[in-house]
Image: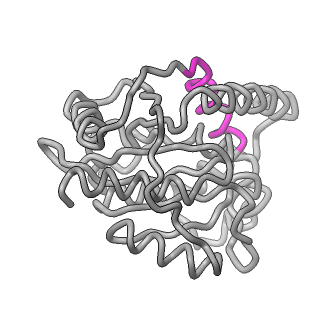
Amino acid sequence: MRLPAACCGVVGLKTTWGRIPTEGVRPLAPSFDTVGPLARDVDGIVTGMSLLEPGFQEDVGWMPATVGRLALPAAPDVDAAIDAALAAGGVRVVPVALHGWRDATRAGVLLLAAEAWVADGHLVGTGKVGDDVVAKLEAGGATTRAELDAAGAVAEQWRAELSDALSHVDVVALPTLLDIPPLLEDANEMMNVRATVPVNVAGVPAISIPVPASRFPASIQLVGPSGSEARLVSFARRIEAAVGR
């Protein structure tokens, strides 16, 4: 949800893993797969969540006491856009360090590919998927048990690290994409600019919101603990209003 939203200048909500049933959804990687809404604005996200989960209500007026700002190697104008949006939102921002981010990214990519092979490897050779997807599925199929065990251990450590960080700050803020979205002919670059995989590994919710930047709308990603969607939506609304969307 967050990557398409970031590429299209809209809002996307990744829900807590397991919160919204995935029955009827084509599987990709069952330990990662989630269902969540995409919408033009935060109002649309609330409407989408109420359809996915009848009775869902925004925690109206909720504001984080402290936002942890995760620094990643993003383009300068993306970083500036994120910082300006947080400043406009009037929240207390402190730096947060997540040393396992890079390892969690690698582990997540490996685990996702391995699960995708199990779920969708039968499509290889059918001509129904592109060569780039076939290559990723086959790479997942070549993963060894030792690699899976090592990646699983990294994932477990990462979940503990992020959980600890979220016990000291209410929300972690970072870019959704480290640079402007790549063009279609450069689609493989998405692997290098996305900043979402570790959040998927952790299974926690996150919302992405477009914010003004110099070249192209940037996207701020707000991450909270499991089950905090109602609060994330409220804070996202504050940021949305502050940047004048």
33 in relation to 144, above or below: below
* Residue at the spot 62% in from the left edge and 24% down from the top edge: 103
* Residue at the spot 52% in from the left edge and 57% down from the top edge: 131
**Residue 191: x, y in percent?**
46, 41
Left or right: 213, with 204 as reference point: left
219 in relation to 96, above or below: below
Residue 189, can we see it? Answer: no
Q: Which residues are magenta?
A: 98-111
* Residue at the spot 79% in from the left edge and 29% down from the top edge: 147
Q: Nearer the viewer, residue 221 or 151?
A: 221
Question: Residue 192 falls in which quadrant of the image?
Answer: top left
Q: Nearer the viewer, residue 2 or 181?
A: 2
Q: Nearer the viewer, residue 30 or 147?
A: 30
**Residue 232: x, y in percent?**
50, 53
Left or right: 152, with 110 as reference point: right
Image quarter in which the C terminus is found = bottom left
Is residue 104 shown in magenta?
yes
Number of numbered discs present?
A: 0
Question: Residue 214 falls in which quadrant of the image?
Answer: top left
Is residue 137 shown in magenta?
no
* Residue at the spot 57% in from the left edge and 57% down from the top edge: 229
**Residue 91: x, y in percent?**
36, 36
